[in-house]
Image (cartoon, rainbow, N blue to C red):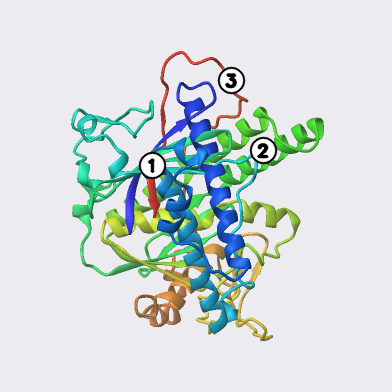
């Protein structure tokens, strides 16, 4: 189920920082204590304990009592859910091991010095305070303003999530199928002309978008700021670690937190820009290319691997899928093997790569330089545009298959080069100092998440 998530970032020095530290540390201790009991029971053949059995056993534990009872029960539920997921994964692995990279492992412990998230469900939220416009988690100093129009029954939970150098307080609520903020006024322009789009995900171009109408100029979202931010973070973290040795520091945590905030903002603005373009053009269906295990099995070389792996493409896809489905656009994520090598202008056959089977396939065209692809007759097309059209052919054959006649008759009608969209996002590259708390300063990084 898809929910809306409102996020507030708590940094060191904030008046709620100490509380977040205390409850998340207690949550970690309770989690590890109960997890040890469950693991020992499983190892010695007694099975695992249910949430109710764990609650009965640990309701007098010191860490259990440090948290509200409802919150402690939800921590124990995390353990119960992890074991249920393990048994389901194990059963699926026995049926078809090829779907996994290895045998599922039993649920483990959290880092001894780490923290664990805590959840306040609707029963642990003050109803009277909510009616007065304040979200007040049980026995906590946290007071968040209620979003205008939000009803108590729509509130799902409030979470405190430990992150690098900060805590994020998340308010999770369900507002049905209402379009995402900022897109509401544009949804009326969607019509049923049946235009389809295909997205090729990359590094320098975060997303290259082509359309089933080849005369519409493709779109490329400039991904170089994202690549640059990751490179800067790697260099700064490496420099600081060369000075302090093993471990971390407040400066390193500040750098990583600022990078994460930049990436979060960049992906939201990029997906919102794409959604607005689709609404204006009347796109009704979208194909996105994504190969299984494309991060773990990446073999692009040392530098390109680092650039590719550190860009959260899966997060980008989930954000974009959420925004598009909210405005009624169908999204299909499909396999994209050989789409970069096949020639769209020559309408090459695009096979599907099968693990363990070597297939020697020859194609009519060839990619050269960095972003150019030359077809059999010498016509040059942008390499990412070529890959995008091939993804559309492979994932949405009914929409893009009709282009065969057009391309064979006149390949020159295809717009070969994309229009680049640059996102203007301010970087925070100063290492912020920890200052004593003066006034509440909540950084709102509201967005969406899949629960």
What numbered label is drawn on residue 232? 2
Q: Which residue is mark 1?
A: 69
In the image, which is nearer the foreground, mark 3 or mark 1? 1
Residue 239 sits in which quadrant? Answer: top right
Q: In the figure, 274 relative to 106: above or below?
A: above
Whether 360 is drawn above or below 281: the answer is: below
The answer to whether 369 is drawn above or below residue 267 in the figure is below
State if disc 2 and disc 1 touch (CB < 8 Å): no
Look at 43% across and 51% down and name the residue there. 55
The residue where tag 3 is placed is 434
Considering depth in this image, is 176 or 47 the residue closer to the camera?
Answer: 47
Q: Residues within 10 Å of mark 2 (few under 14, many from 20)?
A: some
Residue at left offset 50%, top offset 81%: 347
Structural distance between the alpha carbons of marks 1 and 2 = 44 Å
**Percent of width and height locating residue 162:** 52, 39
Locate residue 204, reporting x and y percent: 58, 52
The quarter of the image holding the C terminus is: bottom left
The front one of 103 and 57 is 57
Upstream in sequence: badge 1 or badge 2 = 1
Q: Quadrant of the N terminus?
A: bottom left
């Amino acid at each position: 189920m898809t929910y809306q998530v409102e996020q507030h970032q708590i940094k060191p020095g904030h008046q709620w920082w100490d509380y977040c530290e205390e409850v998340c540390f207690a949550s970690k201790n309770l989690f590890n204590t109960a997890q040890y009991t469950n693991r020992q029971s499983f190892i010695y053949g007694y099975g695992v304990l249910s949430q109710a059995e764990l609650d009965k056993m640990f309701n007098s534990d010191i860490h259990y009592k440090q948290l509200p009872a409802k919150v402690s029960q939800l921590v124990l539920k995390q353990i119960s859910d992890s074991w249920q997921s393990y048994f389901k994964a194990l059963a699926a692995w026995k049926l078809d091991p090829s779907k996994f990279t290895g045998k599922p492992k039993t649920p483990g412990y959290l880092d001894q010095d780490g923290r664990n998230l805590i959840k306040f469900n609707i029963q642990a939220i003050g109803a009277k305070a909510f009616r007065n416009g304040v979200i007040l988690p049980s026995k906590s100093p946290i007071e968040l303003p209620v979003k205008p129009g939000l009803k108590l029954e729509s509130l799902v939970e409030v979470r405190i999530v430990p992150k690098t150098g900060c805590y994020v307080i998340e308010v999770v609520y369900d507002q049905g199928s209402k379009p995402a903020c900022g897109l509401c006024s544009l949804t009326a322009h969607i019509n049923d002309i049946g235009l389809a789009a295909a997205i090729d995900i990359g590094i320098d171009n975060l997303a290259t978008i082509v359309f089933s109408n080849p005369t519409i100029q493709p779109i490329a979202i400039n991904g170089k700021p994202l690549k640059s931010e990751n490179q800067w973070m790697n260099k700064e973290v490496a420099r600081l670690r060369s000075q302090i040795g093993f471990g971390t520091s407040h400066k390193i945590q500040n750098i990583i937190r600022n990078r994460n905030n930049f990436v979060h903002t960049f992906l939201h603005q990029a997906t919102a820009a794409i959604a607005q373009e689709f609404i204006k053009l009347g796109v009704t269906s979208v194909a996105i290319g994504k190969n299984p295990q494309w991060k773990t099995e990446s073999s692009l070389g040392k530098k390109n691997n680092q650039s590719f792996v550190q860009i959260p493409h899966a997060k980008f896809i989930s954000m974009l899928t959420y925004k598009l489905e909210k405005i009624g656009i169908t999204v299909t994520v499909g396999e994209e093997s050989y789409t970069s090598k096949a020639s769209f202008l020559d309408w090459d056959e695009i096979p599907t790569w099968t693990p363990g089977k070597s297939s020697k396939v020859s194609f009519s065209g060839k990619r050269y330089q960095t972003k150019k692809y030359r077809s059999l007759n010498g016509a040059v097309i942008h390499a990412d545009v070529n890959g995008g059209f091939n993804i559309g052919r492979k994932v949405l054959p009914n929409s893009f298959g009709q282009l065969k006649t057009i391309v064979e008759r006149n390949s020159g009608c295809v717009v070969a080069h994309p229009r680049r969209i640059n996102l203007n996002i301010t970087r925070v590259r100063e290492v912020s100092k920890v200052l004593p708390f003066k006034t509440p300063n909540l950084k709102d990084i509201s967005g969406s998440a899949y629960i």
